[in-house]
Image (cartoon, grey):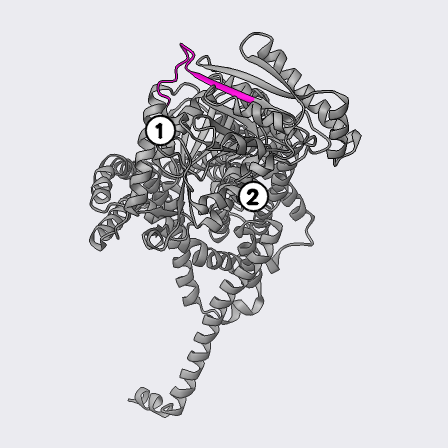
Amino acid sequence: MASNMTLSSTTPKGLCEAGKLNYVDAATKVFLLFLIFGLSNLAHSLFRRINQPRIASDMFVGLFLGSIYNTHNFIAPAIIIILDNIIQFGMMCYMFVLGLEMDPHVVFKPPTCEAVMAYGGMVSTFVVGCSITPFLGYLEKPNLKYILFLSIAFSSCSSQVITRIITNLKIGKSDIGKLGIGAGVHCDMISIFIICVGFVVFFGDTKGTTEHIKGSIKMGSALVIQTIVAAKVSPFLMNWVNSENPEGKTIKGSYLVLSLAFMVGICSCAPVYSYDPMLSSFLGGLFLPPGGRISKWTVSKLNYALSTMFYPTFFFWVGFHASILDYELNHWMTYVRFLLLIVMMIAVKVVGTVIAGVFMGFHWQESVALGSLLTAKGHFHVYLAMIAKKGMIVSNSTCDSILFALFLTFVHHPYVIVNIIRRGQKREPTHGRALQWLDPGHELRIMHCLQGPDHVPATINLVEVSRGAAEPGLIVYVTDMVELTDTIATTLVHSGGDNTVTVTDKTVTELRDEITTLMNGYVQDNGQGLSIKRMLALSTFNNMAQDISIMAEDLMVSLIILPFHKNRKANGGLEEGHPGFRYVNRKVLRNAPCSVGILVDRGFGTITNITRSAICVTVAIIFIGGKDDREALAYSSRVSRHQGVKLTVIRFLVDRNSDNEARRANNYRYTVAQLEEEMKLDDECFAHFYERHVAGGNVAYMEKHLANSSETFNTLKSLEGQYSLIIVGRGGRLNNTLTVGLNDWQRCAELGPIANVLCLDEFSVKNSILVIQQHNKGEVVGLDEDFSTM
C-alpha cells in the first residue's frame, strides 16, 4: 500500500519528467547512430581520395567515437548487451558470406603458385610468432593453445580486403593481381579452417581430461555431420530451388524462406554442442554450393547490409571496448611489443613470401610487393583481438597495440599497388597498347566486337588466321554490342549492392546464346592455343564506346576489332548501316587504350573450312609508311604463321625523280628531320619483317613504285578480286605524297584514305578490308628490365 502511494505521488508530473528523460536518452542514442553512419560515409569519401579501402575509414571513425569519454557515460549496460549480440550476429553473417565465396576443393588439388606463395608467408609468420610470443608478455594467461591461436591469427590475412583493394585500383586482371587475390583467398581459408579445427581440440569441456575428450568428440561429430549435410545434401535442395526460380523472375517468397531456413539450420548444428557459432557459420558457408541464384542472392544482400550498416557499428563497438584512452604510453615495453607486432605481421610475412618467390622463380621486387599485399588483416582479426581482451587473454594495452598494428597492415596497400603499376609501365609501356611493341613471348589479347550473329562467321575466320602459334596462345574476348533501350532497361535485374546486372530480355539472351553456340562450336574443333571469353557492352550509343574502352583497359587487350557499321548486301555492295554504331566506332578510334581495327566484311565470312593443311585464303598487306602501317605489318606477322594463308606484302614506294621530289617538297608539312626519322622507323620495321618472313619464302613480296596518288588509286583498283582480305593502316603518315587527293573519294573518315578507295562500290565488291590504327601512346622513359609480369 505504501508502495502504491509512493508511485502515486510522482503522478502526473513525476512520470512526465521521467518520460522526458527517456525521450532525450532515446533521441541521443538515435543521434549517435546517425552520427556513426554519417561520419563513416564522410570519412570514406575523404579516404577514397588517397585510395584507402572502406575498412580504413570505418576503423578510424569507430575508434574515435567509441573512445570518447562521454560515449561511455550515457550508454546503459543493457544497450551494451544488445550491441554485443548485434555484433555477434553480424560476425556470423560475415563469416557465412566469407565461407560461401571460397572454394574448399583447392585444398585437395596439387599446390598451385598461389598456394605456395600463401604458405611461404604463413609458415614464416607462424614460426616467428610461436617463438617470441611467450617471452614478450602478450598473453595474460600464457599457455599453448593461446600461443598457437595468436600465431595463426598473425599469419593469416583478409581476402576480402585484399580483393577489394586490388580490384578498386584496377590491377585485378594483371598477373600479380590475380596471384595476390588467389594467394589471399587461400591464406584466409586455410588459416580460418585451422582455427575451426583447433577449436574442437582445445576448447572443449575443461572440467577434466575425460570430459574434455567427450566434449571434443561430440563437438567434432556434430561438425562432421553439419559438413556432410552442407556438402552432399544441400546441392539437391539448392538446385531444386534454382530450377523453380529461373533468372529473370522474382524469387518466390516461400522458396526464399525455405532456403534461408535451411542455411540457418545447417549453421546451427554444431553450436548445439558448444561449438562457436561464428566458426560454424564459416564452415556452413564454405561447404554450401556457391553457384546458383539463391547463393548469389544471399551473398549480394548480406554484403550490402554488412558494408552499409554493420561495419560502422562494428568498429564503434570496437572503439567502445578498446579503451584506447588507457593506452600505456609511458611504459617502454608497450613500444617494444608494438614494434615486434609490426615485424611479425608485416616484415616476417614479406620475408617468407620472398623465400617462396625464390623457389617459384619470381623476381624479388614482385615477391616483396605480393608479400606486402598479403599482410592485410580485416574484420575477423579485429574481432579476435576484442574477444581476447574481453576474455582477459590479453591486456588492454596489448589489445590496443594489436588494433594499431592491424590498421597498419592495409593502409600501405595503395602505395604498393601504385609502385606495381609504375614498374609495369616502365617495363612494358605499351603492353596491351600496340601489337608492334608486344613481346612475342606474351599471349595476344584481342577484343572482337559484334553487332549480331551475322558477324560471327567473319569473326571466326579472322580469329583463325590471327591465331599464330599455339604458344604463347591467343585470348579473344567476343563482345556483343547491344544498345540499351527503354525496353531492355526494364528487364535488367540488379544484384543488390553489387554493380553487376543480369540481362533477362528475351531478344538479347537469344542473340547472346546464338553467338555463344557458334563460337563454342568453333572452339571445340579448333581449341588448341585459343581461349574464347564472352563479354557484353550493353549501353546507349553515347556511352558504348566508353564501356568498350574501359573493358579493353581492364582486360589488357592489345587490339580492339570493330565491325564496320555498313553491312554487305547481296550484290556485294554496302548498305547505309546504322549511324549509332558508326558513332561508336569513331569514338573508340579516338579514345581506345590500345590499337583499333575496323573489319569491312565483303565476303570474308563466307569462306568455310580454313585449315592448316592447304592454302585456302589469300591475304595482302599494303605498306606505305607511318605508325598505322607498321602496326598493320605487326598484325600481319601473326597472319603469316598460319599455314592455310598465303600472305603477300605490297609495298608502295615513291618513284624518285626530280618532278616528284619538287611535288613532295610542296606537300610536306613536316621538317626534313621528322621525315627522315619516320623513314628510318619504317625501314627498320619492314627490314625486320622481311628478314623473318619474306626471306624464308613464307610471305610473297611486291613493290610498286608510284609517282602520285593517281597511280596509287589505279594500283588499288587493280587489286579487285585478287585477295580475300586486305590489311591496311588507317593513316598516321607524315609523307602523304601517295595519298594526297584520295580524300576526295572519302566517304567514311574512320577508314582512312586507302581503305575508303578499296571500299568503293564502283569497282570493288569482293575485297574485305581490315583497317588498323596504332595506339598513339608513347613510350615511358627509364625502362626497368628487371620487371616481370610473372
Disc 2 residue crowd, few under 14, some 14–19, many 20+, Cα 10 Å: some
Q: Which residue is mark 1?
A: 519
Q: Residue placed at 42% from the left, 61% from the top?
A: 83
Query: What percent of the width, then of the height, locates residue 760?
Result: 49, 33
Which picture quadrant has residue 222?
Answer: top left
Can you say which quadrant of the picture contains the N terminus?
Answer: bottom left
Lateral position of residue 83 relative to residue 285, left or right: right
- Amino acid type indicated by mark 1: Met
Q: Main secondary structure of the magenta part?
A: loop
Describe the element under mark 2 as helix, strand or loop.
loop
- Residue 687, image quadrant: top right
Please, is residue 24 above or below residue 510 in the view? below
Residue 169: mark: 2
Q: Which mark is residue 608?
A: none
Q: Is residue 617 visible?
A: yes
Where residue 375 appears, x then y in whole percent?
A: 56, 39
Depth check: give the residue in front, 755 or 201.
755
Q: Residue at x 44, y 59 (%)?
A: 309
| Total marks placed | 2
- Given residues 92 and 38, the one toward you in this image is 38
Left or right of 756, for residue 675: right
Numbered disc in front, either 1 or 2: 1
Where residue 502 appears, as percent x and y from the top left, is 35, 46
Instruction: Identify the residue shown where x is 43% and y is 75%.
Output: 26
Residue 49 is situated, as x and y percent measured from the top left of the image, at: 61, 53
Name the element at disc 1.
helix
| Magenta region includes residue 610 | yes
Q: Amino acid at mark 2?
A: Leu
